[in-house]
Image (cartoon, rainbow, N blue to C red):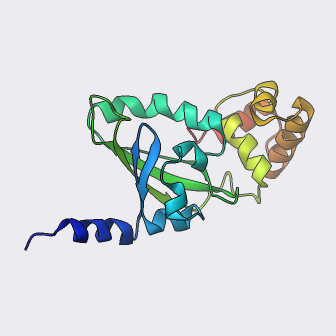
Amino acid sequence: MACGDDDLAEGFRSAPVALALSRHRIIQACNRAFAALFRAEADALAGRSLALIYPSVDAFADVVEHWLGPLRDGAEFADERFMKRGDGDVFWCRVAGRSLTPADPLARAVWSFAELPTPPHLDQALSRRERDVACHVARGRTSKEIAKLMGLSPRTVEGHRLRLMRKLKVSNAAELNVRMGGGVI
């Protein structure tokens, strides 16, 4: 027995996995699980940039270079990263995607999202700001670069780095960079 369009649409809306369809990185449709995960109304997300669910505009921009090759090849690409809910809460998430148009990978794509426990090396009761700084540290950015991206003073970023070092029990910035590099893209 074949499914009709109404059955497929309801299946998408009711799927237990957070799903979104995008065109050129704009959310075209998302299901109830996606809306619940990101603490937003599904209707309010349609037509909005996927940047909305990234911890920073920079993180949204950086991910493209990692995904384009596999998406162009027609493969699924997945990684784990910090994402941001509608209320600003930052959480660890597995993101998987596949292009529906490999010749133009971001023209049409389908994405799934699954919240994961924060990895032990990052799960030390980090504040939202510390998590945001941690994302940038993982990308090898300097305090000055992070400050500019986050609209903070370099001294404030240094304070967050220092607290991260204490919480993660590392003694210098090089060890912090190594510790933060695991799994974050």
Q: Position of residue 6 (x, y in %)?
A: 24, 69
Image: 62 above or below 90: above
Height in image: 173 above or below 21?
Answer: above
The location of residue 116, given as percent across then percent down, is 54, 61
Q: Quadrant of the C terminus?
A: top right
Residue drawn at point x = 41 percent, y = 55 percent: 29
In the picture, measured across the screen, residue 113 lies left or right of residue 118, that is left
Residue at point 53% right, 43% down?
A: 49
Report the front residue among 52 and 162: 52
Query: Residue 156: where, in percent of width, then height?
Result: 90, 38
Label total for image:
0
Q: Is residue 7 visible?
A: yes
Q: Quadrant of the N terminus?
A: bottom left
Up-down relation of residue 16 to residue 34 (above or below): below
Residue located farthest toward the left when viewing the structure as drawn: 1
Quarter of image, res 14: bottom left
Q: Is residue 119 visible to the viewer in this orientation of the structure?
A: no
Residue beneath the point at 90% across and 40% down: 159
In percent of width and height, residue 2 lies at 10, 69
- Image side of residue 46 versus residue 71, left or right: right
169 vs 8, left or right, is right
